[in-house]
Amino acid sequence: MFTLSAYKRQEPRPWSSCLIVCAAVVLSLAVSALMLRLQGKPALHGIELLFQGALGSRWSIEDCLIKAIPIFLCSLGVAIAFRLQIWNIGAEGQFALGAIGATWAALTFPDQPGYILLPLMFGMAFLGGGLWGLIPALLKLRMRANEIIVTLMLNYIAILFLDYLIYGRWKDPGSFGFPMTKAFSVGAIVPKIGATEVNWGLVLCLVSGVVMWVFLRFTRMGYELKVAGENLNATRYAGLPYEKLVCLVMIFSGALAGWAGLIEASATINRLQPSIMVGYGYTAIVVAWLARLNPLTIGIASFLLAALRVGVENLQLELQVPAAFGGIMEGMILLTVLAGSFFNEFGFRFRRPS
Amino acid sequence: MNTELIVPLLAAAIQSGTPILYATLGEILTEKSGVLNLGVEGMMITGALAAFITAQATGHPLLAFLVAGLIGAAIGAIHAIVCLWFLGNQVVSGLALTIFGLGLADYLGTPLIGQTAPGFNKLAVPLLHAIPGLGPILFQQDILVYGAILMVPLLWLFLDKCRWGLNLRAVGEHPEAAAAAGISVLRYRWIGILGGGCLAGFGGAYLSLAYTHLWTNGLSAGRGWIAVALVIFAFWRPGRALLGAYLFGGVMAFQLRLQAVGTHLPSSLLLMLPYLLTVAVLVFSSWKSKQAAAPAALGVNMEPND
């Protein structure tokens, strides 16, 4: 008799993680097809609509890129925090505060030209998102408060604060009672690239992705971050500035999410309204983990999950499937990838019982 | 303030605290076995929906309550499979479970928005309900409120006096030593996760069957997360969980009452109160406790040895 036993691999295999993600996507698609079937909807046609909606035309691919921009920025921020083993679940709230900061600048100085107003908005979004990220960092370092719960609660608080502003002091008197601010002036809008619908946020993504990659790979602090994330004891032993690292990482993590909020408010909807909060901050966590916290693969994963959102919108339109369908798939993909990573780290062999 | 205001407020506090109490007790059980499950929110909302659908279909609220527990445990089982069998990261798996559960409940619940289901009504305990003040607060509640209160000593007895409970705690403190002593680590962690999921499902059922009798999407509104925070506030002790849950229930009831009365404060600011309080309570209890009260092996998977 032989028994099957697991052993830990010395080197994780590079290709198997890609394979695992593909398998997870296929499995999740299969389960979603089943769910459509259970609701009495055509399953295969549904999957077809999903793909067609996401990648079927130039317009839909542009839409995927537009949605990938905020997801990418949030995810990049989440990923650096995760690398340091700081569980920043607060991208959603930092996104909201970024949008609020940028909107404040846009509403206060509407007559300024873009070359003055846009940098100011980026600064305010950085401040808003960054400070919202710094709060949990300080509470963790000074009071040992668990950052998962603090960042999550700050999400709820941020969204309610946004509601407070939109329903109250920032409400446009000419909106016929709808909760929204005045439309942004021309100078406050991030322009589009050439003749496309895609805004210059895409370039910001490329730049920040490359900067992050260089930072993690070639700078001293990037190296310290890697060491500190892998082994907290080594950090203390080697005298690395752990507290400083945590604060800086959380400020930048929050600021990136804040910029995502700015771009959504400015380029996508041209004002602040409650529909700006669609859960990009939570999708970003899924993306960061699928991409194994690597800036390059985060780009690919952001596009994929943005495509999922666009595809689900088509499904919603054609088959009246609730938008929550996308959430189910996101959760399923992440769960199967988590389980599947086991085969990346562990191998199996048959053994003769001794 | 006079008793005419205070008594209904306290009665409402116990009502809004009850779902959080179920969920907190469940998460204590799970964490005591060394597993962190951040999927409470997801298990709670799927439990709430399962209860609602069952109550609508059968008209038996008690059956619906039990089904919610089963469904909560079934959602928890996903976490168990990912973390116990496949050694997935517990933090990320729990988050994924919440995303999945919220999505599932929204997806299946959207056609039901605004519909009602038969639920639990308040019943007066004979004689005791007539006590002035105390009667309306404690003895004119629905049966699930008493169920939650009963769970507190039961969980304490299980964790502190029962052999199985002691084994479960050993697994949470030092899995290698427990395994060496012949205790099956995986079995007790399964028990911890399934039990916790069941209680989270009960908490959800309370929301849809007793707190409201009506389905709306996002019914749990972060209560699952508040429960996760309360475990820390409670130092992993069931008795303090009771205190914490009713404290939160009080704040929620208070802000609802203020909204109903109509103050100058906008409702979005009032709605922040429970979340602000969660942060405050968490900071306070983390800062105060000198040594960690958390189970030593919390969140750490046990790898198979070669």
Image: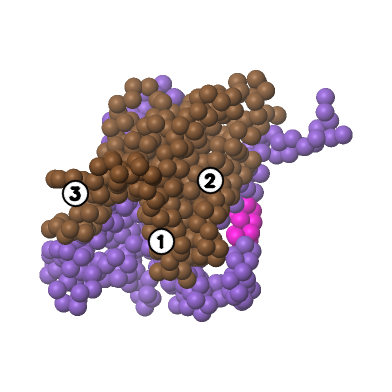
The N terminus of chain A is located in which quarter? top right
The crowd level at tag 2 (other Cα within 10 Å; few <14, some 14-19, many 20+) is many
Q: Are marks 2 and 3 on the same chain?
A: yes
In the image, what residue occupies the spot 53% across and 29% down? B158
Left or right placement of residue A97 versus residue B178 in this view: left
Q: Chain of mark 2?
A: B
The amino acid type of the residue labelled 3 equals Glu
For residue B216, above or below residue A317: above
For image coordinates 43% across by 72% down, the residue present is A63
Please determine if labels 1 and 3 lie on a single subunit.
Answer: yes
The image quadrant of residue A70 is: bottom left
Disc 1 chain ID? B
Q: Helix, strand or loop at disc 2?
A: helix
Query: According to the colouring, which chain is brown?
Result: B
Q: Where is residue B204? Give x, y as percent.
A: 45, 52
Real-space Cα distance between discs 1 and 3? 26 Å
Name the residue that disc number 2 marks. B198
Of labels 2 and 3, the one closer to you: 3
Chain label for disc 3: B
Determine which residue is flagged by label 1: B213
According to the colouring, which chain is purple? Answer: A
Quadrant, the C terminus of chain A:
top right
